[in-house]
């Protein structure tokens, strides 16, 4: 049991893919299984105290899922991690470097290592698939046209959508659009990839495809995945580590199996409201 933000937060101590590393080695070490350490992060908007001392770990090259009811602070938390906003206090340690204190070009350089896959993909309708993926390279690098083409096609081929390079987003299925969004997010040599509600608006079969895409991208590109989701069936299929945020505080954070073992009332209510059976969740949490 680990205490986060003044509340008891569950944290598994067993090593392995679906567990928490046993100790904290030197932050930033190549063998450090923790990629990002969020420590005592607070964020206010005027009188509203949205994040209230949030602390949890994000495991390297694993799928880390953040869940919680609407208004719990999930999106605000992600903005602090990717440093679209600056926390009022606390630390966001990425490979041992506190992103919360970075400014200017130092922040810009570091932030290029993080990619975002937005809800509903957020592709540019007026650009082809190729140009959507090439956009970050044209904006943020000095690569030649040939180098940009090679990098873009490499990403498209890696995600199995090279044949769609000259298509328009409107010509693609929802699942294909998510693949294009991922290709765009990893084209800048990204090592952290944040997915904002990646299954929103998709049918059950496409949801499965997106779940597989997250695992596939992690394996092929070696990225650390952070997923914000309300889709509990998807959550327990993909999560290696699960963090439940409620009213701006971490209630529980750990391997899915341990989270299920120690449900508190707020998480139990949240799961029951999802409509997914506890039996399904328990079975997938222990896979």
Image (cartoon, rainbow, N blue to C red):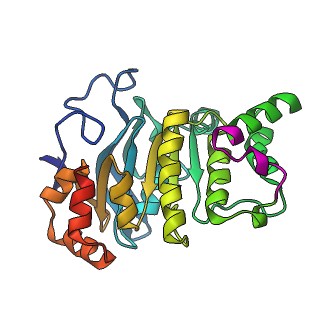
Q: Nearer the viewer, residue 167 or 110?
A: 167
Asked whether residue 86 is in view, the answer is no
Q: How many marks?
A: 0
Left or right, 228 with respect to 283, comes to right
Residue drawn at x 58%, y 45% as measured from the top left: 115
Q: Nearer the viewer, residue 174 or 148?
A: 174
The magenta stretch is 156-167
Residue drawn at x 19%, y 46% as measured from the top left: 11
Asked whether residue 109 is in view, the answer is yes
Find residue 278 and report its image quarter: bottom left
Whether residue 158 appears in magenta in the rendering, the answer is yes
Left or right, 175 with respect to 225, comes to right
Whether residue 21 appears in magenta in the rendering, the answer is no
In the displayed structure, 99 sits above or below 204; it is above
Residue 112 screen position, x and y as percent: 61, 38
Q: Nearer the viewer, residue 286 or 99?
A: 286
Residue drawn at x 71%, y 34% as measured from the top left: 154
Residue 263 screen position, x and y as percent: 15, 63
Residue 118 screen position, x and y as percent: 59, 59
Residue 17 screen position, x and y as percent: 30, 37
């Amino acid at each position: 049991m680990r205490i986060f933000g003044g509340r008891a937060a569950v944290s598994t101590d067993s090593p392995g893919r679906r567990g928490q590393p046993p100790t904290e080695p030197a932050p930033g070490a190549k063998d450090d299984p923790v990629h990002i350490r969020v420590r005592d992060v607070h964020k206010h908007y005027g009188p509203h105290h949205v994040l209230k001392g949030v602390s949890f770990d994000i495991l390297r090259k694993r799928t880390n899922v953040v869940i919680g009811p609407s208004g719990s602070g999930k999106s605000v938390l992600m903005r602090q991690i990717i440093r679209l906003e600056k926390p009022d206090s606390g630390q966001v340690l990425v490979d041992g470097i506190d992103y919360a204190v970075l400014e200017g070009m130092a922040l810009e350089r570091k932030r290029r290592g993080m990619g975002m896959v937005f809800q509903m993909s957020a592709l540019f309708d007026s650009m082809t698939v190729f140009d959507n993926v090439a956009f970050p390279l044209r904006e943020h690098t000095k690569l030649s046209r040939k180098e940009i083409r090679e990098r873009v096609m490499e990403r498209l081929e890696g995600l199995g959508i090279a044949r769609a390079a000259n298509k328009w987003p409107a010509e693609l299925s929802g699942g294909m659009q998510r693949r294009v969004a991922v290709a765009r997010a990893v084209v800048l040599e990204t090592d952290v990839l944040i997915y904002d509600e990646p299954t929103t608006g998709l049918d059950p079969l496409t949801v499965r495809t997106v779940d597989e895409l997250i695992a596939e991208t992690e394996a092929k590109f070696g990225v650390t995945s952070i997923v914000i989701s309300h889709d509990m069936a998807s959550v327990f299929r993909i999560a290696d580590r699960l963090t439940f945020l409620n009213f701006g505080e971490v209630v529980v954070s750990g391997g899915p199996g341990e989270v299920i073992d120690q449900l508190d009332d707020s998480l139990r209510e949240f799961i029951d409201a999802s409509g997914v059976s506890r039996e399904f969740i328990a079975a997938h949490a222990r896979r």
